[in-house]
Structure formats: C-alpha cells, structure tokens
Amino acid sequence: MTVIDIAPQAVSASAPTLVQLSGDIDIFTTARLRQRLISALDHSTDLLVLDVSRVTFCGAGGIGVLIGVKGRARARGVTLALRGVSPRMARLLRVTGLDRQFPTTA
C-alpha cells in the first residue's frame, strides 16, 4: 500500500509547501493522491514541492495526476516542483518530455 504523507510544511507565506510521497503511484492510488494533492494545493504557498525521493513506482496514472495538479497549480499562480527525483523517475520524466515542465529543487 502506498503511503502518501500530505502534511504541508510551510513555516511562512514565503516558504515552500512540502508534500512527501512514498510507495507506488499506480491505478490503485491515483484517485487518493489527486484528492490529497488538490487539498495540499488549497493550502499551499507560491511554491508546492513534491518530494518523490521515496516513490518506488510511478505509472501512467501517476504522470496524469502530476500533469493535472500542475495545471491547477498554474491556474492559481502556484509553481509545482519536484524534489528528490530518482534516476528512474528522471528517466520517466525525460522520456515523456515532462522534465522540461517540472522544475526540480535540491
């Protein structure tokens, strides 16, 4: 089972909101992930950072969720960034052309 730790961590309005994801992002978890990320977006600062360092698998549905949440974030003036991108995730983003769409942070 995937653990999605949505505990937005924002110390101040200028600090980024951090969401930590872990486990598999697949057909069984995408609906819950979408709901939780939209909720996090509702409480986000200008920068919403998804820490994907503990994501073990990301399927097509997971990519779809990231694209959808990115669109919602952009409409609200929020930047969606990824942190802790593994080589496997980096390859997935590169192959799909999404590496140019998602900024990454250290």
Image (cartoon, rainbow, N blue to C red):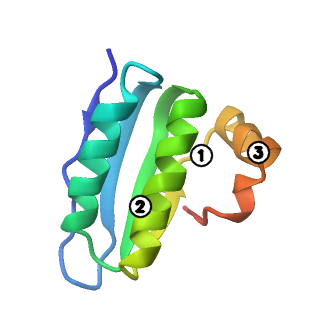
Give the numbered dot on residue 96: 3
In which quadrant of the rendered image does the N terminus lie? top left
**Distance between the alpha carbons at the discs numbered 3 and 1:** 15 Å
Q: Residue at x 36, y 25 (%)?
A: 29
Give the numbered dot on residue 49: 2
Disc 2 residue type? Val
Residue in front for this viewpoint, 78 or 50: 78
Mark 2: which secondary structure?
Answer: strand
Q: Residue at x 52, y 32 (%)?
A: 61
Disc 3 residue type? Thr
Query: How many residues crowd mark 2 within 10 Å: few (<14), some (14–19), many (20+)?
Result: many
Q: Residue at x 33, y 72 (%)?
A: 16
- Residue 8 position, x and y percent, is 21, 57
Q: Residue at x 76, y 39 (%)?
A: 91
**Residue 3 seen in render:** yes
Tag 3 near tag 1, CB within 8 Å: no
Residue in front for this viewpoint, 50 or 38: 38
Indicate whether 89 appears above or below 37. Answer: above
Residue in front for this viewpoint, 89 or 29: 29
Q: To which residue does mark 1 refer?
A: 85
**Distance between the alpha carbons at the discs numbered 3 and 2:** 20 Å
